[in-house]
Image (tube, rainbow, N blue to C red):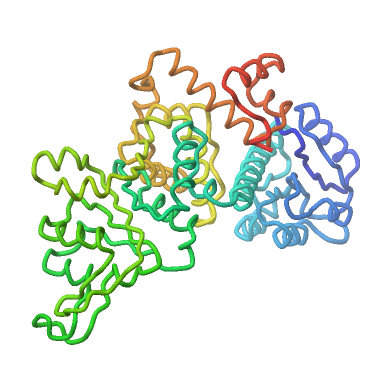
Amino acid sequence: MFEGYKVVFVEDDLPVRVSLTQTLELEGIAVLPCRSAEEALPHIQPGAQIIVITDVRLPGMDGRALLAHAQATDSSIPVILITAHGDVAMAVQSMRAGAYDFIEKPFAPERLVDVARRALDLRTLRHSADELRAQLQRASGIEAALLGQSPAMQQLRRQVLNLAGTSADVLIVGETGTGKELVARCLHDQSARRDRHFVAINCGGLPEALFESELFGHEPGSFTSAAKRRIGKIEYANGGSLLLDEIETMPVALQIKLLRVLQERRVERLGSNEELRVNVRFIAASKSDLKEQAGKGEFRSDLYYRLNIATLQLPPLRERREDIPLLFEHFVAQACARYERAAPELTPAKLRELMAHDWPGNVREIRNAADRFVLALDDLDPQAALQAVPNLPLAKQMDVIEKALIEQALRRAQGKVPAAMELLGTPRKTLYDKLNRHGIQLDAFR
């Protein structure tokens, strides 16, 4: 269960050391017995796949000094102290200093095994989170930004890379929280414009009275409060990219002026008679169907057809459920680093709950859920785990969940098949059959 992980057990009393070492080994836990803290020191290294169990009272370096050394070397290594009755107050102080737990003598062997298992669980989860963070840091380019291995996300990355090298304006369509601004930034970052400004403006967040000045700029005296010249967002983005988010909310009068800028590539500040040539890539984002709005007269059809040359359709999370575990673990790793918390265990029951949820808030909602998971706050709807994955036949539901569980085990096992077999309780041939059926590549987890 804890393949590759060991207990560094420090005890100077030989009979006790031998007895407790055998107790742990009989439970399938690997042990490195040490007769002194000094003997244990070489095993305590940054990233070591170990936990430490040590008696407090030792000849030479004592257990508290060993705890301090482990904390200074790698504070994520759990350290358990074994104390005499009179040392309990001191042990509590040691826990405040970073010890994982303490065991008071005399104790039942089952107590030692239970605490060791919990500490090993924590260590494996922390190590998995560290590995995930390292993998994400090693990832480069667009795959590090637009996470997901579903066919929809692979196609989206290909489309972004295909369009990034062109000067074509792009329309991004997707529900709230699907990452429209992130995709816009990827288009900019993967283009030759990456060294120039990326400017984002929320068309729904500006009062109509200020919108024209914000977009086009103004000259001094062009209106009552215009005391000095203002460079508008379009001019400021010259040579770079301009994101017009929630473009469906742009006032119709301004849509006419924007259409002219798109066609002529010239902009005129309010109060000026001079037209300025601009080289800007316009990226529009909308959560609404602009064609439908144009049919209702709520959006100019000529602007819609001008923007609709290159369109990126972002899939909602419920249509790419196979990406849910990866996204959730990614945001959990970020939350652990941000809140300085250890990653809680992502159990199969929790994973089923995540897969069953419909995620109306999409990626933004799953990030929020990951934060709450790390902070041990309220879970998702408790009934969600009891429901089937909606809108899919039963066989497909089972396939989606089975694939997610296998991929989660492979991530925790770092792509090692024997470890994944143990986590899943699955024979080798069965696991390989399922890898082939689901098209899972082991190299992606190593």
> From the image, which quarter does the N terminus lie in?
top right
Q: Is residue 278 above or below residue 21?
A: below
Task: Pick the residue in front: 390 or 261.
Answer: 261
- Residue 225 is situated, as x and y percent measured from the top left of the image, at 12, 82
Q: Total marks drawn? A: 0
Q: Residue at x 43, y 30 (%)?
A: 321
Residue 22: quarter of image:
top right
- Residue 71 is situated, as x and y percent measured from the top left of the image, at 70, 59
Residue 217: quarter of image:
bottom left
Task: Pick the residue in front: 111 or 281.
Answer: 281
Q: Is residue 139 above or below residue 355?
A: below
Residue 244: quarter of image:
bottom left
Task: Pick the residue in front: 196 or 272.
Answer: 272
> From the image, which quarter does the C terminus lie in?
top right
Left or right of residue 183: residue 192: right
Q: Residue at x 45, y 26 (%)?
A: 352
- Residue 64 is situated, as x and y percent measured from the top left of the image, at 74, 59
Left or right of residue 228: residue 85: right
Q: Residue furthest front?
A: 264
Left or right of residue 32: residue 260: left
Q: Is residue 325 above or below residue 283?
A: above
